[in-house]
């Protein structure tokens, strides 16, 4: 059962019986009823009582409920007419009036709507200066004519040279110096191809 529906079980335990899941109900939303048929088909009469009848209406008062069938009973509530809580009851009758059940209902005024100004939907942030990294990349890209891919390859070449120099300084052998020369030559060829 959802928060705005009342479920009425028809002929669940025996013929001409009605049972509800709740004895009283309170809501600030639209209200609905679901009639659930069980053992035998039946006719159910629905009516509003008390002050509930002045702000709500049932489109159709008589419903035929087939075995193992569910029928929705829409109840129109004039939400604008509710300034304070309105109490009343919903009555369900079957078996030519031999069985009835009532549910006390209290309808509360709807929560006030909050109006949102349309200007709040648009950000009012002014464009700030871009971060230093973005400015540096823009300078290299626009003023020097180097795109970001070329810049990434140059940075990788500089890193390779730094590793080769550190290795040569640490090891200090002829092989390390020869490796440094090969890395230096590879970086020089890559720079020549990119530019």
Image (tube, rainbow, N blue to C red):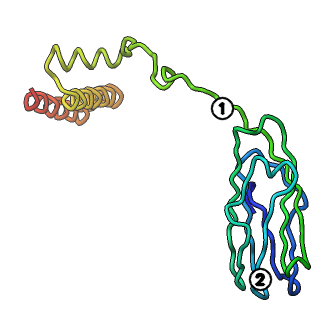
In the rendered image, which residue does mark 2 sit on? 42
Q: What numbered label is drawn on residue 113?
A: 1
- Examine the rendered structure and indicate whether residue 134 appears above or below residue 89: above
Say which quarter of the image contains residue 187. Answer: top left
Say which quarter of the image contains residue 185. Answer: top left
| Front tag of 2 and 1 | 2
Residue 154 location (% of width, % of height): 21, 27
**Rendered residue at 88%/52% (across/down):** 50
**Rendered residue at 77%/82% (across/down):** 42
The residue closer to the viewer here, 50 or 192, is: 50
Residue 76 location (% of width, % of height): 68, 53
Q: Is mark 1 on a helix, strand or loop?
A: loop
**Rendered residue at 29%/29% (across/down):** 159
The residue closer to the viewer here, 21 or 34, is: 34
- Examine the rendered structure and indicate whether residue 127 appears above or below residue 16: above
The answer to whether residue 191 is left or right of residue 18 is: left
Q: What element carries label 2?
A: strand
- Examine the rendered structure and indicate whether residue 24 appears above or below residue 142: below
Gap in angstroms between the C-alphas marked 2 and 1: 42 Å
Residue 170 location (% of width, % of height): 36, 28
Crowd class of label 1 (few under 14; some 14 to 19; many from 20; radius 10 Å): few
Quadrant holding the N terminus: bottom right
Residue 78 location (% of width, % of height): 70, 45
The residue closer to the viewer here, 83 or 133, is: 83
Going from N to C along the chain, the mark reached first, 2 or 1, is: 2
Say which quarter of the image contains residue 146. Answer: top left
């Amino acid at each position: 059962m959802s928060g705005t529906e009342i479920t009425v079980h028809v002929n669940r335990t025996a013929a001409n019986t009605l049972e509800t899941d709740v004895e009283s109900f309170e809501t600030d939303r639209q209200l609905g009823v679901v009639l659930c048929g069980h053992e035998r088909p039946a006719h159910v009469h629905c009516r509003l009582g008390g002050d509930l009848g002045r702000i709500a209406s049932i489109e159709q008062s008589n419903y035929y409920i087939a075995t193992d069938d569910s029928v929705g009973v829409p109840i129109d509530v004039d939400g604008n007419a509710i300034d304070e809580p309105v109490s009343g009851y919903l009555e369900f009758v079957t078996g030519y009036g031999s069985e009835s059940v009532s549910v006390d209902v209290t309808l509360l005024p709807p929560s006030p709507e909050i109006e949102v100004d349309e200007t709040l939907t648009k950000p009012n942030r002014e464009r700030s200066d871009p971060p230093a990294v973005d400015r540096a990349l823009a300078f290299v890209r626009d003023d020097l004519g180097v795109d970001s891919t070329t810049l990434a390859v140059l940075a990788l070449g500089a890193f390779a040279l730094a590793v080769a120099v550190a290795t040569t300084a640490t090891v200090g052998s002829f092989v390390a110096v020869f490796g440094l020369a090969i890395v230096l030559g590879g970086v020089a060829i890559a720079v020549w191809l990119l530019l």
